[in-house]
Amino acid sequence: MAAVADAKVVSVEAKPVLATGTLPVFTKGTYSTKNITVETSSNTSSPPKPLFIVTPVEKGIYKVILFLHGTSLSNKSYSCLFEHMASHGFIVVAPQLYTSVPPPRATKELNGAAEVTNWLSTATGLNSNLPENVEANINFVALTGHSRGGQTAFALALGYDTDPKINPEVRSKFRAIIGIDPVAGTSKSTEVDPPILSLHSFNFTTPVVVIGTGLGGVSRCIRPCAPEGANHEEFFKRCTSSGAHFVTTDYGHLDMLDDNPTDLVSWTISKCMCKNGEESRDPMRRCVGGIAVAFLKDYFDGESGDFEKIMEEPSVAPIKLERCP
C-alpha cells in the first residue's frame, strides 16, 4: 500500500432537527469520514499525482467523485466540502494536478487528470489506498471540477486529453459531470487551450449539473474571477444532455472553499483576488455539496426525490439559489 499520511477521522454528529423548507442533503450525512493523503512514490500502488481522499469509514461499496481543483489552489482547501459529500456515502478523490503560480498550460493539467483517471481502476489503484472494508465502485465516477478545474473536467469528458489518452473503457465510467463555477480563461474563450467553448455543443449523453455563482462575474481586483463569456452560463448552454443549472446568487467564485485555507496560495487567492459573499462559507458549501449529493443519488441510484425538490423549489437550499431555465 502507498504511504498514507495526515489521516484523521471526522465523526458526524447527530443530525439537527431540520428547519422548515430544508432537505437532509444540505446537512451532514450519516457516515463518519476519514481524510487520507496519498503521496506519489516509487511504490507500485502510488498514484501519478498526490491525492487527497475523503471517504466513509463504515464497511461498504461507494461510488466515486473525482474532483479537479481550481487555478493554483490546494486540493485540501476544499476539505469541508469533501467531508459533506463523503458523509452522504461517496468517496471523494482530489488529485493535486500542479502547485505552480501561474498554472501550467491547460493541456498539461488535462493530461495529468487523464493519468489519475487511468490509475483509479488499476489493481493497485484507488482501492489499495482505502480503509479496510471500504471499496470504491469505479464503474460509477462523477467527474467534477471547480473554476479552471471545471474546464478540465469538461475537456476530459470531451476527449481532449492527448498524452496519455484515457482508456475508452475507463472514460465510459464517467456517469455524471458536475461543474462548480467552471471558467475557461478570459472572455476570449476561443483562445483557451483546449478551446472547448469554441464548440457549438458538447453532445454529452452523460447528465450534467452546473452550479454558478452570482458574484463570480464581479471584479474585485483587475478583472472578475469568472468573467462573462467564459463562465458557467457558457458551459451549460452547450450541454445537450439532461441535468440542471443553478446560480448561488449572493456568493462568490471561491466561497465553496474552507473558511481559512491552510496553504498560503489558496488563502491569498481566496481572500484577496475574488469577490466574496457572506463571511461564513458554511451555507455555500452545504448548498453546493447538497446539490451534488442529490444529483448523484438521482442519476446513480434512482433516488430522485431530493433533486426534484431542489429543481422545483430552489428555496429549500440554505442560501438564495436560482434555477436557470
Image: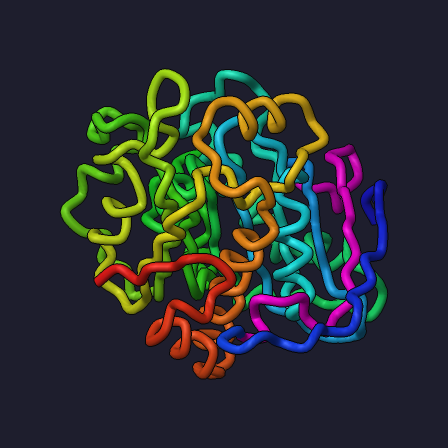
Q: Which residues are magenta?
A: 23-47
Viewer-proximal residue, 269 or 252? 252
Report the residue that reaches farthest toward the left: 200
Does the image show residue 300? yes
Viewer-proximal residue, 246 or 149? 246
Report the residue that reaches farthest toward the front: 20
Give the overall secondary structure of the magenta segment.
loop
Q: Residue 305 appears in which quarter of the rendering?
A: bottom left
Left or right: 71, with 210 as reference point: right
Q: Is residue 195 above or below residue 104?
A: below
Q: Residue 177 appears in which quarter of the rendering?
A: bottom left
User: Residue at point 56% right, 27% down?
Assistant: 271
Q: State how the image is colored.
A: rainbow
Task: State the image coordinates of residue 17 (x, y, percent, origin top left).
Answer: 68, 77
| Quadrant showing the C terminus | bottom left
Task: State the image coordinates of residue 220 (x, y, percent, origin top left).
Answer: 40, 23
User: Residue at point 63% right, 65% down?
Assistant: 90
Q: Is residue 293 above or below residue 168?
A: below
User: Residue at point 56% right, 55% down?
Assistant: 283
Task: State the image coordinates of residue 206 (x, y, percent, origin top left).
Answer: 35, 64
User: Residue at point 82% right, 70% down?
Assistant: 133
